Structure formats: structure tokens, C-alpha cells
């Protein structure tokens, strides 16, 4: 129960990494506010694990404040923020539409700024807190056809390193989890050959699991990681070193 009594806000909690993180946090004793723009799936996961559900746009200033206020009003404090919500709109740069660039940057990068800014007041008042952003191996090594996605995920790393320096004196840590190829509903839907080809790029010889990402986030959220800040924790099986 490494997170007993802690209060966490997790965006994109209705599926994938976010759902796994929410389940792990609740299992470790945290009170979780699960945020997702898809009300049906978000409410379903929240109901299953006993979390509080909030529907909203992660890139909206007003919605971000509401997510944080919900946690503080319901539980009296805010200890952990996990900015996980993200989208991909892949296309070669020559064919990429400006709307697809803007949407990915807004959801994957700007939303983390908005959410972290909203979390500053309660965390600074407490002189304690954990901010964790879910980036990607693509933000470290790049990938053809994903200039918008790679830029957003690389931007998270720079953002978190800068913020870590700003708030360290208040005992607030800011870290990044950078997953590699992880087995999700999306990867399961591709051909067996494609999965074999992907695994061949990974020294450990397999795709990761969403629980691997959740375990990394849980560690960074725990007191065990109190002396770690501005760090990028790679969960990629050695795909990028």
C-alpha cells in the first residue's frame, strides 16, 4: 500500500496506460480522480475500481481547474497528477494537415501544461507533490510519419525537466515515463507478422504490458522516489538506450 491515503488525478484513465495506472494506484491505497473525455468508458472503469470520474477536455483551462478542484474538494488535498491522455494522428509531414498538428500538440503537450499549472496552488501550499507525464520512446528516438506525435512527446520531456527545477524547493517532483512498444488493444489488432517484426526491434524480445507502465508511474508517485526529479524512466525493453 505504497500510496495509502494519497490523492491522485489521472487523465486518460478510461483505457490503456491510464486505466492500468488507475487500477494500480487504487490497489496501492490511493484515492483516484479518473479523467476521460469518453464518458462511458471512463465512468465504467471508475465504477469498477471505486474511483471518482470526471469528464472533460484535458486541454481546457476551465476543465483542468475543475479536475483539480474535484480532487481537493472531495479529499482535502492533491498529491499526484498523472498526465497520460494522448492522441496520435499519423501522417508524413508533406501530407500532414495543420489541424492534425494542432490537435496532437494540444492534447499531448499543452494539456500537461494546463493540468500542471492548475495543480501548482494546492501542491505549493502543501509543499509536496508528484507530477508525472507519460511520454513515449518516439519522443526520444523519432519515428517517420509521426512528426507531430514525436514533437509533443519530446516536448513533455523538456517541459518536465524545466518544471522540476522550478518546484524542487517545495518538495514537488516532476518526472516522465517513456513507454516503448506496449501491448494494447491497438497493437493486438495488427497482424502476427507485424508483432513479430516489432518484437525484433526490442532487445528483450517482446512487447511490454500496460502494467509495466503502471508500475513505473506508481514508483515515481511513491515516497520511494522522493529523491528523483527531472528524470525520464524508460519502459521500452531496451528499444532505446
Image (cartoon, helix red, strand yellow):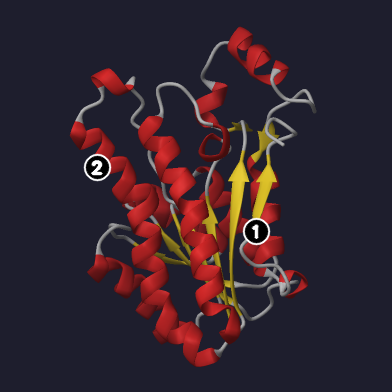
Q: Is residue 52 above or below residue 69?
A: above
Q: Is residue 84 above or below residue 52?
A: above
Q: Position of residue 234 (x, y in %)?
A: 67, 45
Relative horizontal placement of residue 49, taking residue 69 as reference (left or right) = right
Q: Position of residue 142 (x, y in %)?
A: 51, 30
Relative horizontal placement of residue 154, taking residue 219 as reference (left or right) = left
Query: Which quadrant of the figure has residue 55?
Result: bottom left
Give the secondary structure at mark 2: helix
Give the residue drawn at x 53%, y 42%: 16
> Mark 1 and mark 2: span between their CA atoms?
27 Å
The C terminus, quarter of image: top right
The residue indicated by pointer 1 is: 231
Q: Is residue 114 above or below residue 122?
A: above
Q: Position of residue 93 (x, y in %)?
A: 31, 23
Q: Nearer the viewer, residue 233 or 33?
A: 233
**Hey, which residue is sitting farthest bottom in the picture?**
125
Give the residue drawn at x 45%, y 85%: 122
Badge 2: few (under 14), some or many (20 or more) residues near its Cα, within 10 Å? few
Q: Is residue 140 visible?
A: yes
The N terminus, quarter of image: bottom right
Give the residue drawn at x 56%, y 39%: 140
The label on residue 147 is none
Q: Is residue 220 above or below residue 5?
A: above
Badge 1: few (under 14), some or many (20 or more) residues near its Cα, within 10 Å? some
Relative horizontal placement of residue 43, taking residue 15 as reference (left or right) = left
Q: Is residue 84 visible?
A: no
Q: Position of residue 146 (x, y in %)?
A: 41, 28
Instruction: Work out whether mark 1 precedes mark 2 in sequence or the reverse, and give the earlier one.
Output: 2
The residue indicated by pointer 2 is: 102
Give the residue drawn at x 60%, y 45%: 178
Amino acid at each position: 500500500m505504497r500510496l495509502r491515503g494519497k490523492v491522485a488525478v489521472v487523465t486518460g484513465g478510461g483505457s490503456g496506460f491510464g486505466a492500468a495506472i488507475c487500477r494500480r494506484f487504487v490497489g496501492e491505497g490511493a484515492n483516484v480522480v479518473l479523467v476521460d473525455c469518453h464518458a462511458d468508458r471512463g465512468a465504467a472503469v471508475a465504477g469498477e475500481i471505486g474511483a471518482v470520474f470526471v469528464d472533460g477536455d484535458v486541454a481546457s483551462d476551465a476543465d483542468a481547474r475543475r479536475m483539480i478542484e474535484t480532487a481537493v474538494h472531495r479529499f482535502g488535498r492533491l498529491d499526484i497528477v498523472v498526465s497520460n491522455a494522448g492522441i496520435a494522428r499519423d501522417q508524413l509531414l508533406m501530407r500532414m494537415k495543420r489541424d492534425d498538428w494542432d490537435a496532437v500538440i494540444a492534447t499531448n503537450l499543452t494539456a500537461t501544461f494546463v493540468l500542471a499549472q492548475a495543480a501548482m496552488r494546492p501542491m505549493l501550499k502543501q509543499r509536496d507533490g508528484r507530477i508525472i507525464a507519460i511520454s513515449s520512446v518516439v519522443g526520444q528516438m523519432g519515428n517517420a510519419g509521426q512528426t507531430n506525435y514525436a514533437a509533443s512527446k519530446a516536448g513533455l520531456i523538456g517541459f518536465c525537466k524545466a518544471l522540476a527545477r522550478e518546484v524542487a524547493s517545495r518538495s514537488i517532483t516532476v518526472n516522465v515515463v517513456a513507454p516503448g512498444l506496449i501491448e494494447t488493444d491497438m497493437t493486438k489488432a495488427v497482424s502476427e507478422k507485424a508483432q513479430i517484426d516489432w518484437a525484433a526491434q526490442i532487445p528483450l524480445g517482446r512487447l511490454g504490458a500496460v502494467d509495466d507502465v503502471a508500475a513505473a508511474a506508481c514508483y515515481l508517485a511513491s515516497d520511494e522516489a522522493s529523491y528523483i526529479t527531472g528524470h525520464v524512466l524508460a519502459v521500452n525493453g531496451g528499444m532505446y538506450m
